[in-house]
Amino acid sequence: MNSRNYNLNELTAGRSKSKIWPALTKLVGLLPEQRGKLIGALLIMVVYSILSMLPPALIGYTINHLIEGKINTVSTGIPDQSTWMTHLFHGSGYSLIVTVCCCLIGIYLLNLGAVYWRTILMGGFGQHLLYTLRNAVFNKLQELPVAFFAQNKAGDLISRINNDTDKVNQFFSQSLMQFISSIFIIAGAGVALVYFNWRLGLLTLSPAALMWLFNKVMSKWVKKKNAASAKATGGLSAEIQESLNNFKVVLAFNRRDYFRKRFGQANTANYSSAVGAGIANSVFNPVYSLLSGLGQMVVLFYGIYLIRTGYFTPGFLVAYFMYTSSFYDPLRQLAALWAGFQVAIASWDRISHILSLDTDLVTIHESDIPAIPPGGLSVVRTGNGASAGQPPLIEFREVSFAYPGGKDVLRHNSFRMEKGKTYALVGPTGGGKTTTASLLARLYDPTAGAVILHGRDIRTYTPAERAEKIGFILQDPILFSGTVRENILYGNEKYKDGPNEQLTGVLHSSGLETLLTRFDDGLDTAVTLGGEGISLGQKQLIAFIRAVLREPELLILDEATANIDTVTEKMLEDILRRLPPTTTRVIIAHRLNTIAGADEIFFVNAGEITRAGSLDQAVDMLMEGKRVS
Amino acid sequence: MSEKRQKKAVQAGPGGKPMGPGGKPAGPGLFSILKPYRQWIILLVVLSLVSNGINLLIPNISKNAIDAFIAHRLDVDRTLLLFLSAIVGVFVFTYASSFVQTYTSERVARDLRTRLADRISRQNYSFLQKKNTGQLLTNLTSDVDSIKGFVAQAIVSIFSSIFIIIGASIFLLTIRWQLALCVIAIIPIIGFTFFIVLKKVRVLFKASREVIDTLNKVINESIIGAALIRVIHSQHLEYTKFLEANAKALGLGLRILKLFATLIPIIIFTANLATLTILAFGGHYVIAGRMTIGQFTAFNMYLTMLIFPILVIGFMSNVIAQAQASYGRIAGVLYTPDPEEGGTRVSDLKGDIDFKDVSVSYGEKMVLKDISFHIHGGSKTAVIGPTAAGKTQLLYMLTSLSHPTRGTIEFDGYPLDGYRKDDFHRQVGFVFQDSILFNLSIRENIAFSDNVSDESLKKAIATAELTAFIDELPEGIDTVVSERGTTLSGGQKQRIMLARALALDPRVLLLDDFTARVDNQTEKKILENVRANYPGITLLSVTQKIASIEDFEQIILLMEGEMIAMGTHAQLMQTCPEYVQIYQSQKSTSHYEQPELQS
């Protein structure tokens, strides 16, 4: 058994592209409470499209009456669907025009209201959908385990999420409403075209069938091109980020040409895929206007033919021109939006990859775990007998671990750590010390065996309980933009909202206060995400204070003081000593003096965690380990 | 219907606030970018004008056909041919113009990116620190995109829109000018309403872009800080941050929506009133026999053509404003002068290094104060001192990553600036404190410089004690390292960095806290290897561990930017209390390291 694969590029590789409809319904499924808005908007759009179809018919009817007598072809026996209008409008000549105009004003005023409410409801729905989607993505990001972030490039991930949510963003906040209302208008115009004269109507609509066919044939290709372009854009920004972040190496090794060359490659790749996508996207508009022109041509010539044969009236020819543009203009807009829609769908596809991932670090119920025999304990029990009575704080039972696709880092290891003691993990670089620590803090789950905290499988603790009990100072200190104060109180509910005095008091009593003198403006020193302007040692100090202030039961320091000078480090040791007597410390360090005070030392190498009796023995093991390898 | 919004920063870096649009761009203006593509843009405009011109003719053809039909003198074949050739013409020219449009805009974007990258690549490290990565990333991605949008959409759209408005108006006026004037009156009405609403919307757009920046920042931090967030279980905190910004974005989105919800009905209603006018007055004219049915139809058709271009001009004014703002930011980078390339001296370094009264300050803050010392070529020197003492700064100056504010640095008696860069850097190897690995194979990461022979590569790998590790990898030396080296341990990364520096066969080797992540055993071995494989190399090592530098010829103690003492281990133990203090803090374990020294 291996831990789960979270590499998005690998996961995407074999996956077929998702269909549009399921994607859409899934999106709408995200917010059931907004469904009322959506239904309201759709109803209004139906009303609006019916209202919009009336004026051309009225105008056509009026024209027929205007020219009555002028042309002889408008004669008897025509199967005219507009006869109902004669019941509504009486009179002839200009009085008819006035009646119709009044009627039109009424319709237009109704339309005014309909358009307003359509925009408010539909747009509001889109905005809420967007809001929910963004929340869902962010929530998912918070839910996924460390493995997900370790397996995906930070740059690529950031670009993927920012870029893709933005693309979906653009579509939903700008085009969605037009998109949907276009569909309604098209439907209305289509119905009107067939209703008033089905022969002419169907023939007028026939180019649209070609459009549909064309779309069917092209969309796969267009989608592919857009997906390729989005990927290249991600690659480009990842490349820029990598090069810029590593700029000092580029300079120190005088490889400015390397930067240019690598960028040039990514840029060219981005260019060709963008041109490809651009050409694919722009294929629609000309074809659509051609077909819409064909539609008008049909109306003109077949319409004239029908009038000649007595199946149509000239007034409705004018109306048909209007219907044709009501049908084909939104269709062209739809085509313009279609490209954006494709882009949004491609982006949505990429986002849904992330949304479909699950954490493999779920909190499980105690009863669901098969009992794991406390095997291998004999190895541990051979320690000092005094500890046998005390239950361990945390314990490894037959723990094995492997990264996905990699070989075993740990193989069937068991050990226990007791309350209030200090443990050290030593061993050569790459031996598995950080992995061991990560398993203790449940950043990963073992591939076999179990980690037991307070006698319970660590997997049965909620993340909140676990975080409260376990503190972990990571190898690479992480700072958030803000101040030193905000950073050391990050996630600390206890002191977060207290005044500076309270905090200084706490810092003073725990001996942390002196560390703050290392910062120019003390607690108020500004810090950025990249940590520019402060040294690595200072960052480690912040991470140290942050973890200690949380008063965990188990505090893990993973080379947490590697870049701090030894004088300061001595102070840190004092602080560690002054922690409550119940605190268990696990220290990973290369500098042996850092671990000199440890109660027990574990030697971690080549899949094995072995207990060393003393520091001397650990040193021996270190040297021996070297000789063996 | 809403405004095409600028693609927002892929990653807005911390503090990467874009320069306001008020910031006057250095160098020539936005349109100067287009100069090399003049013929393409002219072609583009011509193609789109032709296609729009033909488009304008279609209602006229219909008009003539209807009138001819009513007058019983319609030549169907001729009109059909005319109509068909018109729509095919529109097709051909639209297609050609969108082809040229894609090609031109993407080329502008590509070339602009190349120019920017080229300019950035010539700058000093201080430039990058000043500009910060996030901002440059924005310049290279979304700013370029918004200029691309300008080329792709704005130029053509504005030309064709004006063309259609004028063309349609002329056609209307020639048909019946009295009615035409009534219809044309909607242009200023729609235009004015649009202008007013857009002005309000623009403010909101700006605010919402800032909120999106905040959203992205929270996302970025949550990705970079993922491990910490899980350790502390502060997901909820991050989520609250995000939710707050997201709710703000929603609020702004709804406010923008409200403005458009007022605007769109007004536009549609105005256009409908024009239809009504055409019916009322046109009908009157038709009855009076002063207008034909064909003309009446054409009026309606031109009206539908007229409305969209008005809106397009409004939208495009925004695209232009954004492109201008983006260009302002880009120009700041594009017209940064190249740093002076003064150095011409080429010589094999002996390794003598002199600091003469060197001071460095960032603004008010002094990082190094009057540092003077001499290093003998071929000797080993250590720099030791507490956090934030200025040790890394000192090394940066030796590789001209940063420059002294006062004083000079000399190599072999000649000022550092006098050396030719490529020659100098080939002789000075620098191992950075933080692990910087490229997403390349291990081979390429180590042989990062041009002129690394296989032999030097092998020697460097052996010296850095990487041979065994590399041999164990599935693809050996050609295994690709992922970004930030997440698949490697801290020590492995550090050793690859060392091998990279050694592969140059350097005369001077600068180590920045190299030993922090490498265990003592390996460290000892590596230092011995260096001694054996690179005889005569000058070593300058910034470190925390006294034990590994006791035998160094010279130890420099830095504290808070000042040089406290200098001498051998023995001398400093006699004379320098601060040094003794550091020594004492490490002493407790010294006896454990003693046997290692003998081994």
Image (cartoon, rainbow, N blue to C red):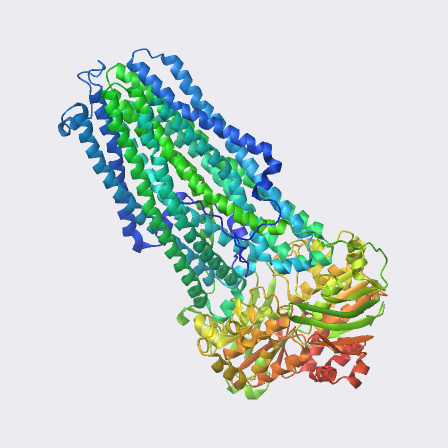
Query: Which residue lies at the image location 58% right of the left edge and 49% below the top edge?
Result: B25
Left or right, A169 with reference to B564: left
Left or right, A313 with reference to B362: left
Q: Which of the 4 image quarters holds residue A19?
A: top left
Answer whether residue A13 is visible to the viewer in this image. Answer: no
Q: Nearer the viewer, residue A252 or A88?
A: A88
Q: Which image quarter is the N terminus of chain B in?
A: top left
Q: Which of the 4 image quarters holds residue A329?
A: top left
Residue placed furthest toward the bottom: A386
Q: Which image quarter is the C terminus of chain B in?
A: bottom right
Residue A153, percent across and down? 57, 56
Residue A490, percent across and down? 49, 72
Answer whether residue A484 is visible to the viewer in this image. Answer: yes
Left or right, B180 with reference to A223: left
Query: Which residue lies at the image location 35% right of the left edge and 32% below the top edge?
Result: B184
Up-down: is A489 above or below B14? below
Q: Nearer the viewer, residue A74 or A464?
A: A74
Residue B103, percent across and down? 56, 36
